[in-house]
Structures are given as C-alpha cells and as structure tokens.
Image (spheres, helix red, strand yellow):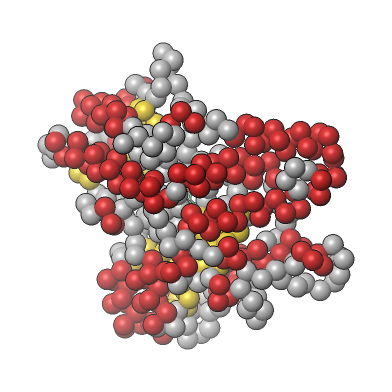
C-alpha cells in the first residue's frame, strides 16, 4: 500500500534525468515540494512588514515556534509543555547536560552506548572535563540494556547520567527507552536520550518512557533541510523545577513579561524555558512544511509502512546472501527503525561509489558499514529492488 506522499517530495535526479533511488533519510531527508511556499510566506511578510512581522505577520514571529509544538508533541509522544524546537542537536545536548548532569565526587559517571555518534561522545567528554572530572574515570560505554543493568547493579551509585541513542547511528539498533530509564532511575541516575535517528522514524513515546530529557535533529527523517532547527524534550516533572541550573537567555523568559526587559530571569514553564535566543523563523518555516506532512500522515501509519519496507529490503538481501556481506542491524523489527546497516567485505567506499554512479543513494561509515534506509513518506519497493540489484552486482 503506497501512502501517496511521494509526489509531494522533490526526488533528486540522476545524470540522465530519471528519479534516483534515494535511500538516505538517516542522513538527510528530502525536500517537500511545499517547503518553498512556507519559506516564501515568511520572506514576503518580512519584505512587506519589516519588524512589524514579529506581531503582524500571518504567523507572528514572536510565537512562531509554537506552531510546531503540538505536532512535535504528537510525533514524539510527549505533552506540548515537554517539547520545543530550538538550536541544533549538539547544542541542545549541551544545554540539557548543563541542567541534568550535576556530578559529585561520589556520583560523576556518564554512561553512553558503545560506538556512540562522535559528537555525542565529544559533548559528554567535554562536560565531564568542564566539571573537573577525568573522562578515563567518568565515561563508561555499554553495549546495550543488559550490560547497562549489570553495570548499574555493581556501580550504579557512581552514575550521574545515562545518555544513550534512541537508535545507534552505525548499527541501526534501537534501544528500549523505557527499559533504560527504569533501570537508571532505580539507581538514582538521570536519563536522557539522543533520538536523532529515531525521531520521525519510530513511534516514540517519550513521555511514557519517563526519560528526563531527549534531543534530536530534524534534518534526517524529519526533512527539515540541511542543518535545520533541532528538537528538545524535557519531562513534565521538570517543567517548573526552578532549582535546576540552566544557561538562560531572554527567549526562555516567560512571554507575558519578556518584553518588560527586566533584570531577573523568570523561566517559561516546560521545555520552552530552555530557549536561549529568538528562533530562526525562515528555518522553522522549512521544518513546518515537513511536520505538517508528518501530522497528516500520522507516525503510526508511517511506522507500519516503514516496517514493511525495511522488512522487504532485508528479505531481498537475504535472498542474495553469499557470505560477502552481513546485516548487522537487529533482525527483530522491534529493535530497529528504517535503517539497515550492511557490513561489506572489501571496500565499502567502492561499493557506495558504484551505487551512487547509478543513481542509488545511500551512505557508508567507517570502517565497513553501508547504511540504507527506506523512508515511508517517499520510498517505494521499486527503490529497494534497484538498490538490491545493483548492490549485488557492485561487489
Ligand atoms: C546520533 C547523532 N548525534 C549527534 C549528531 C550531530 O548533530 P548536529 O551536527 O546537528 O549537532 C548526529 C548527526 O548526524 C547524529 O546522528
């Protein structure tokens, strides 16, 4: 069953003018055809209204980010007060750690997943160092939920923060957010997630997971465009936690009194209270174009279609199994999203180049992983056939 959204996206063309088979949503999603109009609306209002656009634009800029609140909450399974769209992913991760990583000499460790995305690791290491601790002592990596539970049993009282990916960028493995959070909270740890590879991919239930915070980017499955504005979740129980330290800025100040320009900071309750600066409206307009499509299609329907597409990709690859490649992503659809990661014998780069030259777009990561992700909004079974056919012949 085709969901009927493919025609609403620009599909990149091959050299001979045909549609490419674009299987790279895990890296950069495609542009909705409506994006240009959403951006033009703001450019026109700026052209006609100048500064007045803050209050008189069709969508007044002073509250522009609120246009994304309800649909973001629906997308990630959160309450509206728990989400905000701001900054970029790694910046949001730092802002969250400023508030939620409060190490003491007894409890200073951060647990991440093995082979975490480098930026997450750099951010975590720099936070540990910022607090005067030694990453060799304070940073611990675990392979998954079981190893995490073992670690917490033995050394849980030394762990301040667990910060894992929703889906690992390299293996494509999905972690059970509720299970990780339960284990962490049982040992007194704060628990946060980087759901960059899960947002718009899995039907997340961030509120139910009970995580303290989560961050994600919107340029992958969420099609917000290169470097688009990122997302942030702060659990409702922290909505009015004034004791939490934060790096404040005027846009986190409550709106009613923000423009009195007073000297004291009064945080907006909820995730919006972590905003620092006034938001980039033109960039948010691009994101709205895609989020409106997600809202229309519904994440549960998209996820069901995604399971079919990725299952088909898996079955077609299995038909050609010859020992020269292996799927490293879990076989259970409950433990993965759209992406399959394929370990390739020989040069993965050479395989990727041959695919790209024939208009089949995926990507690769060191040392030997080809990443392929059919996106339910715009990919077809035919895209998958093209990939598998060429992949089998390209090795
Ligand atoms: C899991 C993960 N974390 C962090 C990042 C870094 O994101 P940004 O450059 O938007 O901060 C990425 C980027 O792809 C990612 O996949």
Q: Is residue 9 above or below residue 89?
A: above
Query: Against 284, is 239 above or below?
Result: below
Give the x, y percent position of residue 281: 70, 45
Q: Residue at 44% x, 34% y: name it.
A: 5
Identify whether 157 is placed above or below 280. Answer: below
Give me the residue at 24% from left, 49% from top. Answer: 328
Judge left or right: residue 257 versus residue 267.
Answer: right
Q: Position of residue 49 (x, y in %)?
A: 84, 39
Residue 74: x, y in percent? Answer: 50, 56
Report the quarter where the N terminus lies.
top left
Q: Residue at x 16, y 39 (%)?
A: 318
Residue 343 picture location, percent across and down? 25, 43
- Location of the C terminus by quadrant is top left
Res. 336 in view: yes
In this picture, residue 357 sits left or right of residue 146: right
Quadrant of the image occupied by residue 332: bottom left
Q: Name the residue at 31% across, 53% down.
A: 336
**Nearer to the camera, 138 or 101:** 101
Q: How many marks?
A: 0
**Residue 367 seen in render:** no
Give the answer, above or below, for where 353 lies relative to 298.
Answer: above
Q: Quadrant of residue 147?
A: bottom left
Name the one closer to the observer, 28 or 221: 221
Instruction: Looking at this view, name the residue that lies furthest to the top.
Output: 16
Q: 95 or 232: which is nearer to us?
A: 232
């Amino acid at each position: 069953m085709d969901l009927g959204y493919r025609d609403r996206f620009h599909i990149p063309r091959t050299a001979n003018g045909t549609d490419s088979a674009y299987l790279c949503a895990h890296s950069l999603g495609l542009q909705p055809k409506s994006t240009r109009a959403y951006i033009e609306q703001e450019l026109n209002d700026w052209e006609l209204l100048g500064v007045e656009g803050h209050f008189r634009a069709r969508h007044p800029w002073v509250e522009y980010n609120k246009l994304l609140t309800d649909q973001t909450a629906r997308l990630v399974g959160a309450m509206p007060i728990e989400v905000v769209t701001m900054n970029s992913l790694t910046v949001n991760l730092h802002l969250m750690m400023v508030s939620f990583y409060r190490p003491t000499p007894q409890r200073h460790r951060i647990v991440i997943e093995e082979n975490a995305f480098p930026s997450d690791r750099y951010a975590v290491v720099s936070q540990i160092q910022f607090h005067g601790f030694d990453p060799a002592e304070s940073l611990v990596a675990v392979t998954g939920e079981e190893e995490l539970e073992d670690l917490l049993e033995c050394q849980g009282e030394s762990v301040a923060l667990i910060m894992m990916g929703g889906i690992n960028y390299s293996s494509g493995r999905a972690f059970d957010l509720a299970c990780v959070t339960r284990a962490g909270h049982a040992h007194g740890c704060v628990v946060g997630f980087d759901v960059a590879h899960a947002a718009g991919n899995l039907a997340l239930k961030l509120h139910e997971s009970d995580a303290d915070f989560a961050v994600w980017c919107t340029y992958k499955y969420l099609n917000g465009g290169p470097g688009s504005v990122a997302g942030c979740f702060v659990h409702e129980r922290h909505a009015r936690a004034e004791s939490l330290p934060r790096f404040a800025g005027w846009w986190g100040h409550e709106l009613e009194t923000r423009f009195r320009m007073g000297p004291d900071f009064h945080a907006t309750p909820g995730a919006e209270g972590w905003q620092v600066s006034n938001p980039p409206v033109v960039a948010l307009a691009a994101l709205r174009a895609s989020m409106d499509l997600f809202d229309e299609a519904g994440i549960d329907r998209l996820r069901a279609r995604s399971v079919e597409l990725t299952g088909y990709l898996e079955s077609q690859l299995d038909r050609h199994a010859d020992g020269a490649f292996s799927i490293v992503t879990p076989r259970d659809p409950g433990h993965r999203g759209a992406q399959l990661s394929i370990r390739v014998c020989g040069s993965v780069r050479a395989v990727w180049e041959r695919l790209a030259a024939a208009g089949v777009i995926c990507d690769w990561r060191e040392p030997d992983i080809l990443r392929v992700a059919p996106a339910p909004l715009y990919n077809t079974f035919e895209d998958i056939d093209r990939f598998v056919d060429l992949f089998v012949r390209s090795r």
